[in-house]
Image (cartoon, rainbow, N blue to C red):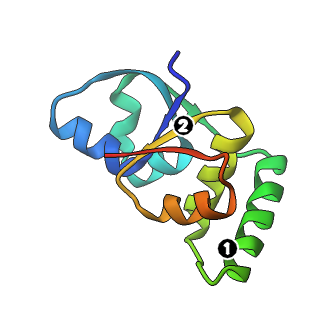
Amino acid sequence: MERKIYDTSVIIGLWKSNVRRLNAYTTIFSVIEFPKTLLIEGLTVLYPTRDDFNEAILIAKDLLKAGKPVGAIDIVIASIALRKGLTIITSDRDFQKVKEVRPELEIELR
């Protein structure tokens, strides 16, 4: 399994390119935003834990202090990636703001 977590923006692009198999992760948020995510074989869906939410709160506080607020869903996805040591594959530049307050966050912009 790749140590990658795919964000909705990239999943939609891959779907449009007829990609139907990924050996990686995504979150329940991507499934909610784009239900066809469930039709991609090999993609494991992650659900946030209490610890993920607690980390997300700390990230949100740091982002607010830095004057760089980000949407709650992106913050929770970032906290999942951080806690599991996964690289976020996304086209959403908001994750760069999270990386500014959590330099250890790995992102790959597409």
Q: Is residue 11 left or right of residue 5?
A: left
Q: Nearer the viewer, residue 74 or 98?
A: 98
Which residue in the structure is indicated by mark 2?
A: 87
- Rendered image: mark on residue 9: none
Say which label, 1 or 2, has the lower sequence index. 1
Total number of numbered labels?
A: 2
User: In the structure shown, which secondary structural element does the residue marked by tag 1 occupy?
Assistant: helix
Q: Residue at x 63, y 84 (%)?
A: 67
Q: Is residue 13 left or right of residue 76?
A: left
Q: Quadrant of residue 11?
A: top left
User: In the structure shown, which secondary structural element does the residue marked by tag 2 occupy?
Assistant: strand
> Dot 2, crowdedness within 10 Å: few (<14), some or many (≥20)?
some
Q: Is residue 13 left or right of residue 87?
A: left
Q: Measure the alpha-carbon separation of dots 1 and 2.
A: 20 Å
> Of all residues shown, which one is farthest toward the left?
17
Q: Is residue 70 left or right of residue 9?
A: right
Which residue in the structure is indicated by mark 1?
A: 63
Q: Quadrant of residue 38?
A: top left
Residue type, label 2: Thr
Report x, y in % for residue 87.
Answer: 54, 37
Report x, y in % for residue 84.
Answer: 70, 34
Q: Residue at x 77, y 74 (%)?
A: 61
Q: Residue at x 74, y 40 (%)?
A: 83
Residue type, label 1: Leu
Q: Residue at x 83, y 57 (%)?
A: 54
